[in-house]
Amino acid sequence: MSIIDTIVQGVLLGGLYALFAAGLSLVFGIMRLVNLAHGDLIVLAAFLILLLSSALGLNPFFAALIAAPLMFVAGWALQYFVLNRTLGNDVLPPLLVTFGISTVLQNGLLEAFSADSRRVSIGALEGASTGLGPLNVGLMPLITFLSALTVIFGLNQLIYRTALGRAFRATSDDIVTAGLMGIRPQRIFAVATGLAMVVVTIAALYLGTRANFDPTSGPSRLIYAFEAVIIGGLGSLWGTLAGGVILGVAQTLGAAVNPEWQILAGHLAFLAVLVIKPRGLFPRAVD
Amino acid sequence: MSIAIPSFKVETRSGTSSLAALAAFAGLALAIAAPLVVSRGVVQDLFFILTTLVLAQNWNLLAGYAGLISVGQQVFVGFGAYAMFGAVILAGLDPIAAILIAGALSALLAIPTAFFTFRLQGPYFAIGTWVVAEVVRLLLAQWKALGGGTGTSLPRDATRDMIGVDLIRDLFGMKAAAASDALTYWIALLLALATIGFIYRLLRSKQGLGLAAVRDNEQAARAVGVDARRMKALVYVATAFVTGVAGALIYVQKARISPDAAFSVTDWTAYVIFIVVIGGIGTIEGPIVGVVLFFLLQKLFADFGSWYLLVLGVIGILVMLFTPRGLWGLFSDRTGIQLFPVRRTLIGGPPAHTPKGGPNG
């Protein structure tokens, strides 16, 4: 029974990783940009939620609701004024600029909030659990996983069912032709990054309530997000969810053997997928 | 009817470069004599500058010339350092000999590493190298004989009894600690010169031309017969060797290791990236300018803690956005001065073409 329990915990943890990864996947899918500051932006959003919930005494869920539009604006501006300048055939500028942003965010947060690790308190929900068939699962991990499902379903609906989504796909496929059809790629990119920041805020809510975080937590979140994207296959959001779940299960299984092996087991699962299927398990696009 | 074939000559040398070579010899003499003249603190600073320069030149060769943008070079620093510690503590070898073994083992590690990371393209390669670095860090943190997660120290007499320390003590009448600092400094100087010499020779060779072609347009380069994958793999393994040697040398001097410090992405990769970007990526001069500037900034802002890194990050972003070829690129464009010219110039014979193309060949 305990192995099934471990796997279920891993699947639920995978929901969190899928949330980390969805924003990264979205931005890469539309503009082939890999944001090395993605993890630090998640941590930034977590601090924003912490600040709103502690300073104004808000419920963290409500605080995230306020943080989301703020993060959207920040993402929009970041893309429009900074990252758009780096896009082109050369992969070096976007990588180095986002790496610089990562360093700036980490050290800015260190100055603002010190190196102490924090946690967003959610009161009674924290330890609450519910019966799921014969199993007993934590309520927050379950909500996290359901949120991941909702976010990915919502993003897919947006991309394949709306005018904005059509513009996303058109710019992704052929930026010049999309421009001729009256789409302004610069704005589309800015909206996409803004949207990714909304997803980042949701991820941050569950990161902050699940475990401690500090200003240097970003890079490892980036790595988990990246692994989930690659395991799932580039360009597929449902693949990203599957990638997150595989990563989560590998980590909890590793931790069940030896707590020190949790992270290592996740990385090894990623490397194994890389060897067996270099393009991921569910690749969509040829990049 | 005969056509006079004008005689062509391809040169990379330029007037300034010969002058610079003279100045370099004078500078070199000073650098060699430094431990006899200046205090131990200054020698340690110079050691730091030289080893950082070696790391920067290697990263520059990878990213600026081979197009392999790695955020995981700390894997070779850390692995080289651990290999050296293992050879000294477990096998009882001399630290100086252990440095070379560390380099060889790092180059060996590069082979399985490349097996994984070369499956990833561009930006994904960058994060892939980072994952590999994390894996190696987590594995070495399990190695209890070398202190596991908390790390360990070199035995006190290991660095004092290194080959050459006695000789330096007798020759110059130094104390053991000063003599071992002088020794590591001279090795760092040798390593820095050898690295720059190696990169310069490589870039002036046929292989270097192929490398530049791959960087500028991989498809076109492959079409004219450059084996891009092989070139990249060779550069990757070569930089792993040198980075491993540098890592081992740095930790001979530090004499204390822990997985978190030896595999620190900030210390061994972030700083190095900013040095290269600010100095000028894709030039040999750039990392030299960058490392001097970096050192001065560090001395100036040492008391400001994380503000220092924050400022460095902002400068790096601004340079990348507005002068992507860095400070040296800016200077070189204005003055035409190149200290390590690798651009091929056609001398003699009509038609008189103005040399065009990329900055470095």
Image: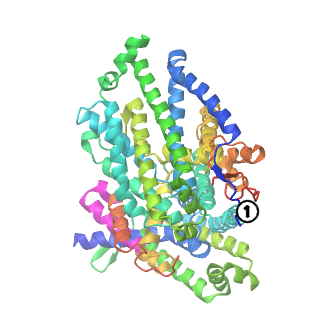
Quickly name the residue at label 1. A81
Position in image of residue A49 (x %, y %): 58, 60
Taking the image as shown, residue B267 lies to the left or right of residue B249, namely right
Is A253 magenta? The answer is yes
Q: Which residues are magenta?
A: A243-262
Position in image of residue A57 (x %, y %): 60, 58
What is the chain letter for disc 1? A
Position in image of residue A208 (x %, y %): 50, 60
Is B237 magenta? The answer is no
Taking the image as shown, residue A71 lies to the left or right of residue B331, namely left
Q: Where A93 falls versus B248 (above or below)?
A: below
Count of numbered labels shown in the rendering: 1
Q: Is residue A152 visible?
A: yes
Q: Where A228 falls versus B210 (above or below)?
A: below
Callout 1 secondary element? helix
Position in image of residue B13 (x %, y %): 64, 43
Q: Of helix, strand and loop, which mostly describes the magenta segment?
A: helix
Residue type at mark 1?
Phe
